[in-house]
Amino acid sequence: MTPEAQDLIDLRLTQANESLREARLLIDQEMCRGTMDRVYFSMFYCACALLATKEFGPSRDGNVAAKFHREFVKSGLIPQEFGERFKRATQLHQDADLGANPPPGCDRLKELMADAESFLTTTKLFLGKQ
């Protein structure tokens, strides 16, 4: 792996950790839209860190979820459940951010935060960063 790829992985893991910490602060204030945003981005950054191991750089085309699914879930490197969790968070984020739907309530967001924490732990284990 190139030093640049390793730097990108480290950056994405830092961003994923920060996003989860921000989500915890926002949920305490019952700020659901911001919490949903940070939960989604935590998972997004995990997927980006994993993709960087395959020399995929920052994606401008919005296909991070598709690339993640193809390279890691479909190939069996990452369990299917994490692909489903990321897909679900992506859809809820888009619905709340761009659609006409409100973000999920606090109880549902706490479940999604647990999914994101598990996704981050699995990502770190896969990358040998735990």
Image: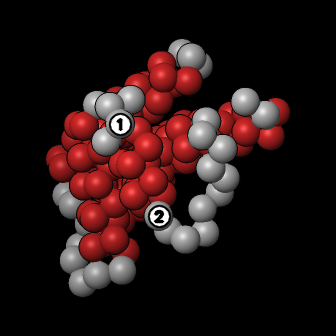
Looking at the image, is 22 positioned above or below residue 115? below
Looking at the rendered structure, the secondary structure element under dot 2 is loop
Whether residue 119 is visible here, answered yes or no, is: yes
Q: Which mark is residue 75?
A: 1
- Other residues around mark 2 within 10 Å, as few (<14) / some (14–19) / many (≥20): few
Q: Which mark is residue 27?
A: none
Q: Residue at x 19, y 58 (%)?
A: 105
Q: Closer to the camera, 81 or 71?
A: 71
Q: Residue at x 80, y 40 (%)?
A: 4
Q: Residue at x 40, y 38 (%)?
A: 72
Question: Whole-percent x and y of residue 79?
Answer: 28, 31
Q: Closer to the camera, 84 or 110?
A: 84
Q: Amino acid at mark 1?
A: Ser
Q: Amino acid at mark 2?
A: Asn
- Other residues around mark 1 within 10 Å, as few (<14) / some (14–19) / many (≥20): few
Looking at the rendered structure, the secondary structure element under dot 1 is loop
Q: Closer to the camera, 79 or 43?
A: 79
Q: Residue furthest right?
A: 3
Looking at the image, is 78 positioned above or below residue 33? above
Q: Residue at x 34, y 71 (%)?
A: 94
Whether residue 26 is visible here, answered yes or no, is: no
Number of the front mark, 1 or 2? 1
Snapshot colouring: secondary structure
Residue position marked by numbered label 2 in the rendering: 63
Question: Whole-percent x and y of residue 44?
Answer: 47, 51
Question: Whole-percent x and y of residue 120?
Answer: 44, 32
How far apart marks 1 and 2 lie (CA) works out to 17 Å
Quadrant location of the N terminus in the rendered image:
top right
